[in-house]
Image: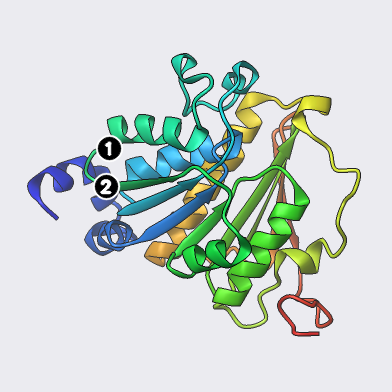
Amino acid sequence: MNDGQLERYSRHLLLPQFDYQGQTSLLESKVLVLGLGGLGSSAAMYLASSGIGELHLLDPDTLELSNLQRQVIHRQEAIGVNKALSAKTTLSALNDSITIVAHTECLSESKLGELISTMNVVLDCTDNSQSRRLHNQLCVQHKVPLISAAAIRFEGQLMVVDPTQENSPCYQCVYPNVDTTQMSCSELGIMAPVVGMMGVFQSLEAIKIISGVGAKSSGALHSFDGLSAQWRRFNVTKNEQCPVCSGA
């Protein structure tokens, strides 16, 4: 690390569990954020500020006025701009010492798999179960840890899938069926800080995986209720009949 990085990340370096080695691991890492909406906004900002060396942002959508209530990485003047490009502009202003790559088009399954295979961690910040299932499948296939989250109304959920850990359950173990009646923010609403909290939680779990700090969070489903301000943890096990991670 150079002098500027030592000063920028000095508060990380003071943490005895993290210190110089933890920060070095971040600076040498590559992370992919899938979706730059409410979850991806807060997750990407903390990943960039924390010093992820190479941060990839993927989102083919353009920014709309209704997004600004919760997608805090974007600015009002970026309405109509691709979200990955808008996010890159904000993050580059926040931390110009890291590499930020914007992917503005949908990738084929094979191309997305190739991209995922080069990452240390993937964050699924998309808003539908079909995308989450595909990203889970590709991460398991390429043995790349995945942090998947969702939020609706006042509730949030998060799950860490770590294919490098023996007997670690995947997303499809917990959600084996496609939800054809999935809920959306445009229909049911979302409290802005709730989705932000889940995105921040995703960034924390990514940093823990990369640096090796803290307890493993795989094998659990974390649930947050914003109205009661309560977190719950549900232990989940690998489905031996899962077609994704068990080869059934």
Query: Do we see residue 213 in this rendering?
Result: no
Q: Alpha-carbon distance for marks 1 and 2?
A: 6 Å
x, y percent for residue 120:
43, 65
Residue 207 falls in image quadrant: bottom left
As drawn, the label of residue 108 is none
Q: Secondary structure at mark 2?
A: loop
Q: Quadrant of the N terminus?
A: bottom left
Quick check: 230 above or below 170? above
Residue 217 falls in image quadrant: bottom right
10 Å crowding of disc 2: few (<14), some (14-19), many (20+): some
x, y percent for residue 190:
72, 27
Q: Foreground residue, 7 or 111?
A: 111
Residue that badge 1 annotates: 95
Q: Quadrant of the C terminus?
A: bottom right
Q: What residue is at 57 percent from the left and 78 percent from the top?
A: 165
Q: What residue is at 27 percent from the left and 37 percent from the top?
A: 95
Quick check: 20 above or below 76? below
The answer to whether the residue labelled 1 contacts the one labelled 2, judged by CB atoms less than 8 Å apart, is yes
Q: What residue is at 70 percent from the left and 33 percent from the top?
A: 229
Residue 59 falls in image quadrant: top right
* Residue 243 placement, left or right of 92: right
x, y percent for residue 9:
24, 45
Q: Secondary structure at mark 1?
A: loop
Q: Disc 2 marks which amino acid? A: Ile
Residue at far right of view = 181
Q: Disc 1 marks which amino acid? A: Asn
Residue that badge 2 annotates: 98
* Residue 97 placement, left or right of 228: left
Query: Do we see residue 103 in this rendering?
Result: yes
